[in-house]
Amino acid sequence: MTTGFTVTGSFLCRIFIAAVFFIVFSCEKKIFPPTGITEDIIVPVSIVSVEQNAAATAEITVKTSNVAENNFELKLLTDSGAEIPLQAGSNEVVSVFKLTTYTSGKLQDGKTYTLQLNYRNELDKSITISRNFTAESTKSWKKLPHAPIADGDFTGAALLSPLYNSELAVYRYADAVNWDILKFDGTWRSVDSKKPVPRHNAIAFPLGQAGGRELIFMGFGFINDDKLPSKKAYLNDFWWTVNYYYIGEHAGVVFPLYTDIDRDVKFFLTYDHAFMLKEDFTGAMRSMDVKWDQKECQPLPEKTGKLATFTINGTGYVINQTAGKAPHLYAYSPGQDKWTRMADFPGVLRELGTAFSAAGKGYFGLGIDAPGNGLRDIWQYDPVKNAWSYHSEYPGQGNRLLVSFSDKNKAYLGWGYESRQIEGSAARQQTGCTDFWEFDPQ
């Protein structure tokens, strides 16, 4: 059966052709100020995070504009409506926004609290936003530096390089001409690149080679047509880079081009193979190895909805999220080319959830429920017991389209978008997020 993914010709021949593109499309690496530093950017006043690393206390962070006057009021309320005092703490300026922390004690474990944020927006309209959280002490979450971004996409094609000290990189769409590639090694560094063509919802991943080497692959995604803003033009090109340190500096084309990329693509990895599925499709899956050879694999046993994936000990896991149904979990054995239905996700029905793995367990949560409300619960999957259990509440702001990175014993996630309800209105705001977190299940 012809799939449009088949690769023909020898690998050496494809390397030679791609090497020409590698040279032609290479560009000088630049370190430049974060993309969004302009004074006309609107930074919505937001409750960024609720961090609970000690019993009975919470540290709350509020984001405001650093270039405009901000008048807001923050209250912490019990479930009976009583107000709990907040103490103002430090201020930090990042790009065009300012982060202000508040602390509170006297929280009771297991009780639900409400943060209520009141402010006036750029049109001088009064806005009220609320965020509920449950008091629970957890040391699994560690706050990392915010990404210095204020426009473009607040998500991107994320990858972690296991061969280069687990350093992180995100291909982020800045505009129709430029990528803002952000690398993280404790601080964010921004690299400008114009190749390949910037696009939304791209994917990126490393594949290992013998001798402790790796190749970085990146591509797919879509661009918008200004004449038809509701339409997506999907791209079928895929690109390779020698290793992590050359991201943004060189890129070569993987030949031949794919021919049937008409939807968003999700993937999971083993050391030297990527397994790719299209969302909202038949369940067909193809693999690609480090030599670019593609192969049709056993399809997922059901049609795909929105997908989230992770890998544990060489087994790939796919969480299939379809409207009105409990998310289904499937495990894929590359050696047997076989799918096995595992325990369904027991939490609230959702779409656009985020998945990752750490220390031999899988994790899934966040997303939005059927009415569009943002969720922040994180659940743990134990592959030995084939069982799910609630783990903790994500302390950050975003609840959909987050970037996530799975390392051996830890994971990293953040950015994305917050779907938040404006009180007294049917409107929901979709707010870009910049916070970033380390997750250690301990």
Image (spheres, grey):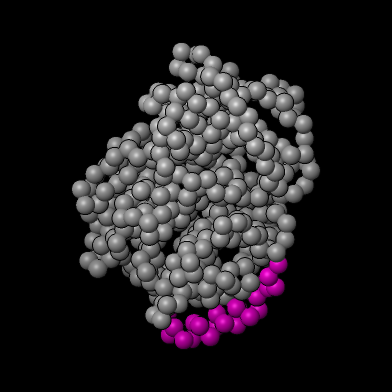
Q: Residue at x 46, y 55 (%)?
A: 405
Q: Residue at x 65, y 60 (%)?
A: 190
- In which image quadrant can residue 141 be found? top left
Q: Can residue 42 be seen in the rendering of this structure?
A: no
Q: Position of residue 317 (x, y in %)?
A: 32, 54
Count of labels in the image? 0
* Residue bounds of the magenta highlight: 6-30
The answer to which quarter of the image holds residue 176 is bottom right
Q: Name above or below for residue 441 compared with residue 121.
A: below
- Residue 111 seen: yes
Magenta residue check for 415 = no
In the foreground, 331 or 139: 139
Quarter in which the N terminus is drawn: bottom left
Tell me if residue 432 comes above or below residue 269 in the rendering: above
- In this rendered view, identify the residue nearer to me: 434 or 341: 434
Q: Give the residue drawn at x 44%, y 83%.
A: 11
Residue drawn at the location 53% of the way across and 27% of the way down: 104
Q: Is residue 218 above or below residue 418?
A: below
Relative depth, front residue between 350 and 170? 170
In the picture, measured across the screen, residue 343 lies left or right of residue 285, that is left
Where's residue 50, x and y in %? Answer: 51, 34
Q: In the picture provided, is 298 more to the left or to the right than 411?
A: left
Residue 257 point in image, percent of width and height: 50, 71
Seen from the viewer's position, the closer of residues 296 and 110 is 110
Question: Residue 215's spot in the image, x, y percent?
Answer: 48, 73
Residue at the extreme left: 385
Q: Quadrant of residue 397?
A: top right
- Does 371 appear above or below 174? above
